[in-house]
Image (cartoon, rainbow, N blue to C red):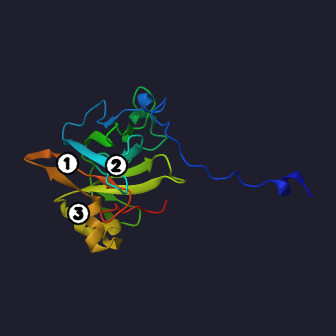
Amino acid sequence: MSDAAKMVPTASQTVGPFFSIGLCPHNPSNLIPEQSVASARVITLKGRVLDGDGQGVPDAVLEVWRADPLGVFSGPDDVASHNASGVPAGFARIPTNERGEFEIRTIKPGVIRSSDEETHAPHLSVVIFMRGLLRQLLTRVYFAQGSANEKDPVLKVVPAQRRNTLIALQSGENENEFCWNICLQGDDETVFFEA
């Protein structure tokens, strides 16, 4: 039997409570480009990552991707759009604080047209890492009162009674501030997608 035939996959391990050590300082915690687009709307998204008991998760890390106001994502080869640290435009890594809170400052993304001509409503793609997870969680956050939400192909496949878990609501009178919590379990569990 060859050595290759004897090899077995490495066992899965839970991700640990160590993400904010060394990873987060090198990545921006906001998604506002250094060369700001004049027509771009700057918004703030605040929320908490909550466990099954409704308690804040203090050591989660959110990786967030967003398209630009024209609905275009920055790719790894789009070096001109990277910031001074080499991080692609539209990407941020945000740790939660001791109460499980996070805050994201960004420009509001535009409507995204996929290669098959489907129209995706403005949204942020969010990946959650935290202790106890064997695999990261993938979700999206949309914005309340977005006219394109009704046509979004991803929202259409989510049962109507669960869509609210993917919608950030306007926070009070400020039309540029939104609130959205990520619930990991329970009655209000956020919709997560297969990667």
Near-viewer residue (169 or 151): 169
Find numbered disc 2 in the image and state the secondary structure of the residue it sits on: strand
Q: Which residue is mark 3?
A: 148
How many angstroms separate mark 1 from mark 2 (CA)?
15 Å
Give the quarter of the image for residue 174.
top left
Residue 144, above or below 93: below
Q: Nearer the viewer, mark 3 or mark 2?
A: 2
Q: Which residue is mark 2?
A: 49
List the single residue furthest toward the front: 53
Residue 4, above or below 75: below
Residue 26 visible in this rendered orientation of the protein:
yes
Residue 118 visible in this rendered orientation of the protein:
no
- At 44% from the left edge and 28% from the top edge, which residue is drawn? 26
Question: Where residue 103 sits in the image (x, y, percent)?
Answer: 28, 40
Near-viewer residue (188 or 81): 188
Near mark 3 (Cα within 10 A), the count class, few <14, some 14-19 or many ≥20, is some
Near-viewer residue (37 or 30): 30
Q: Which mark is residue 158?
A: none
Query: If you read the primary sequence from the N terminus, does the residue marked by circle 1 or circle 2 appear first?
Result: 2
* Amino acid of disc 2: Val
Q: Which residue is mark 1?
A: 178
* Amino acid of disc 1: Phe
Q: Is residue 75 rendered to the left or right of residue 123? A: right
Query: If you read the primary sequence from the N terminus, does the residue marked by circle 3 or circle 2 appear first?
Result: 2
* Amino acid of disc 3: Ala
